[in-house]
Amino acid sequence: MVYNLIRKDFRVRYQGAALGFAWSLGNPLALIILYDVIFTHVFRSNIKDYVLYIFIGVVSYNLFSQAVLQGCESLTGASSFLQKIYFPRILVPTANVLFSLVLSIAAFLVLFAVFPLIGGVYHWDMLLYPFALALFIIFSWGIALVFSVLHVEFRDLKHLIEILLMFLFWVTPITFDVSMIHSHIFRDIIALNPLTYFFTAFHDLLYSGRIPSPSTWGLMAVFATMTATVGMSLFRAKAAQLIELL
């Protein structure tokens, strides 16, 4: 069922497109070229190999934002389908999150293909990246579950989430390194942001070539467990009412 839902999302997204899924590879490649032109020749950053640094962050954040936004609308967008066929409702937001993951994997395939060209160095620590990504997916999935249920009752929620995601982008170490921040207040805000620890791990593994600290792994596991637990609990509590509200 999840596979069929993901395949449906692919058909809808690339319907009528001659190149189809190839656009998922072309878009990140164009993004790398754009970043290279802007941050190498126009605006120089103090961060070494900044194109690599920012690309890792942007692709990861796109995964999170797409998973949350698509998960938020997943139940309301499939209302007619849900009312006709019975199956575990939780599979709908789950399929949306996995669809976002597939699109992001395409972007990372492009990244790994041009890795040495933008300052990256292949190393064994990168093999731990899938584990960090798995925790990130679980974390995103839990949030998507919560918002998918809340959006059934509060249809304006999507617009509020879009604003929140814009704010989160700038308090997450995507375009900057935490060590560059001198403001204690801003440092505290960043430290309170759960995304900080996931992005720190991504940059450690793919950019800096080191293994994230045990505390970073621990916090990622805690946040992933918390959101997944809350998401599943809320979904199960509201499952019986969802069809009526749709």
Image (cartoon, rainbow, N blue to C red):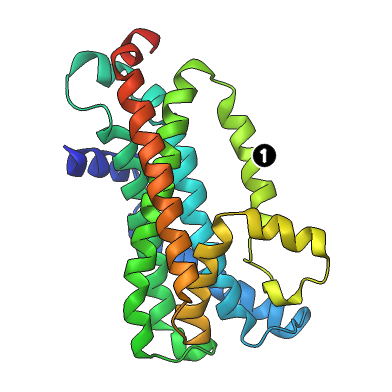
Question: What quarter of the picture does the N terminus occupy?
Answer: top left
Question: What quarter of the picture does the C terminus occupy?
Answer: top left
Q: Residue furthest right?
A: 183
Query: Looking at the image, which is closer to me, 194 or 77?
Result: 194
Question: Quadrant of the rendered structure where residue 8 is?
Answer: top left
Query: Looking at the image, which is closer to me, 113 or 224?
Result: 224
Give the x, y percent position of residue 226.
42, 45
Give the x, y percent position of residue 204.
50, 79
Give the x, y percent position of residue 207.
52, 82
Kindly tell me whether residue 19 is visible in this rendering: no
What number of labels is visible?
A: 1
Q: Residue furthest top?
A: 244
In the shown orientation, is residue 28 left or right of residue 156? left
In the shown orientation, is residue 171 left or right of residue 2? right
Residue at 56 percent of width and 30 percent of height: 158
The amino acid sitting under disc 1 is Ile
Q: Which residue is mark 1?
A: 163
Instruction: Examine the rendered structure and indicate whether residue 74 appears above or below residue 134.
Output: above
Kindly tell me whether residue 211 is visible in this rendering: yes
Binning the other alpha carbons within 10 Å of mark 1 as few (below 14), some (14 to 19) or many (20 upward) gives: few
Instruction: Examine the rendered structure and indicate whether residue 237 appears above or below residue 37.
Output: above
Question: Quadrant of the rendered structure where residue 189 is?
Answer: bottom right
Residue at 30 percent of width and 16 percent of height: 80
Instruction: Examine the rendered structure and indicate whether residue 161 appears above or below residue 10.
Output: above
Secondary element type, mark 1: helix
Give the x, y percent position of residue 241.
34, 12
Residue at 17 percent of width and 19 percent of height: 86
